[in-house]
Image (cartoon, helix red, strand yellow):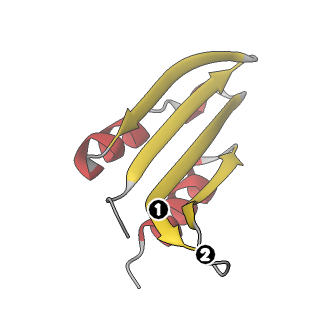
Amino acid sequence: MINGKNYSLKVIKNDQMVNSTRTHSLRIFLKNLRSINWTLGGIKVYMRVSYGFKLNHKNKMETFHNDGWYENEKDLLFAFGCFNKET
């Protein structure tokens, strides 16, 4: 692997982007995750965790990442735990 994890987050309410964050810092990313006001309703969140470049099965450099869209806090935090887990 060439570089560390990158975290991206997009918060969308009523089909308009409310917040967008991109960082290498886990602390800043978690602060932004906790600041989402889920009680407003109608919120969708796109989260992406990139792990950097690795060699794929064809021996070529490729970006590896996990991402997804979430509509509730429980699913978002569960996915973040899975994406951020060290193997």
In the image, residue 83 above or below residue 58? above
Q: Position of residue 43 (x, y in %)?
A: 67, 30
Residue behind mark 2: 56
What count of labels does the image hold?
2
Q: Secondary structure at mark 2?
A: loop
Question: Counting other residues with Cα less than 10 Å from the Cα at mark 1, is it few (<14), some (14-19), or many (20 or more)?
Answer: some
Q: Amino acid at mark 1?
A: Phe
Give the spatial CA distance, label 2 vs label 1: 9 Å
Quarter of the image with the N terminus is bottom left
Mark 1 element type = strand
**Which residue occupies the extreme bottom position in the image?**
87
In the rendered image, the vertical position of residue 85 relative to residue 73, given as above or below: below
For disc 1, the marked residue is: 53
How crowded is the residue under tag 2: few (<14 C-alpha within 10 Å), some, or many (20+)? few
Residue drawn at point x = 56 percent, y = 31 percent: 10
Q: Quadrant of residue 57?
A: bottom right
The quadrant in which residue 5 appears is: bottom left
Residue 49, horizontal then vertical, whole percent? 49, 54
Q: Amino acid at mark 2?
A: Asn
Residue visible at 39% across and 49% down in the picture: 6
**What percent of the width, then of the height, locates residue 36?**
47, 33
Q: Nearer the viewer, residue 30 or 24?
A: 24
Work out whether 44 lies above or below 86. above
| Residue visible at 30% across and 46% down in the picture | 24
